[in-house]
Amino acid sequence: MKSPVALSTLFIALVTAAGSAHALDYVSVADSSAILYDAPSAKAKKLFVVNRYLPLEQVVSLDSWVKVRDSSGSLAWIEKQALSNKRFVEVTSPIAMVYEEPDEDAPLAFNTSQQVALEWLENLGNGWVKVRHPDGMAGYVRATEVWGD
């Protein structure tokens, strides 16, 4: 029979490995538009056409295809060549307020509407995400108002 210390060490190692396997890996659409399919083949059923900068969670990666999840939770396949590792987030609230500092009392940098893609710059780890609008304006938005972080 194994010792309790050995079993505890094995359990901790397995939990740590499982946790790292579930780390979220986000990508974005690099092309001006790309097609989402129901299977990893150009002959599969076409589900949607998506636009540049759309953030997607990478679920499975094959040689030239990636299974992704969008902000609605839908799963689909996309050609790997249509993706970029550049991070973006999608505004999920009807209007997202972006502040000059990570504080709701800070001056407002800009606001933006739902489904706008913002470049992800940094997660501050305190409920705020630093983002940049395609027009170049940057600021901080509440993590609860965006998806893809």
Image (tube, rainbow, N blue to C red):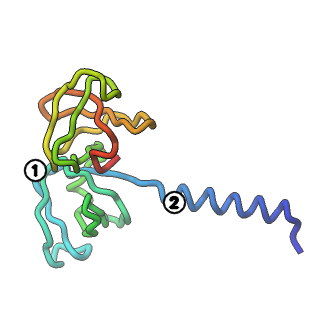
Residue 47: image x %, image y %? 14, 72
Residue type, label 2 = Ala
> Considering depth in this image, is 145 or 75 the residue closer to the camera?
145
Give the distance between the C-alpha atoms of the residues marked 1 and 2, in whole angstroms.
31 Å
Q: Residue at x 16, y 34 (%)?
A: 111
Task: Tell me the number on the disc at residue 99.
Answer: none
Mark 2 or mark 1, which is nearer the start of the sequence? 2
Q: Secondary structure at mark 1?
A: loop
Q: Residue at x 18, y 34 (%)?
A: 133
Task: Tell me the number on the disc at residue 32.
Answer: 1
Residue 76: image x %, image y %? 25, 69
Residue 41, placed above or below residue 87: below
Quarter of the view holding residue 56: bottom left
Residue 4: image x %, image y %? 85, 64
> Considering depth in this image, is 4 or 80 the residue closer to the camera?
4
> What residue did someone put label 2 on?
21
Residue type, label 1 = Ser
Residue 146: image x %, image y %? 27, 46
Q: Residue at x 32, y 23 (%)?
A: 101
> Considering depth in this image, is 41 or 145 the residue closer to the camera?
145
Please state if 21 lies on the left or on the right of 8 as rendered.
left
Q: Residue at x 88, y 66 (%)?
A: 3
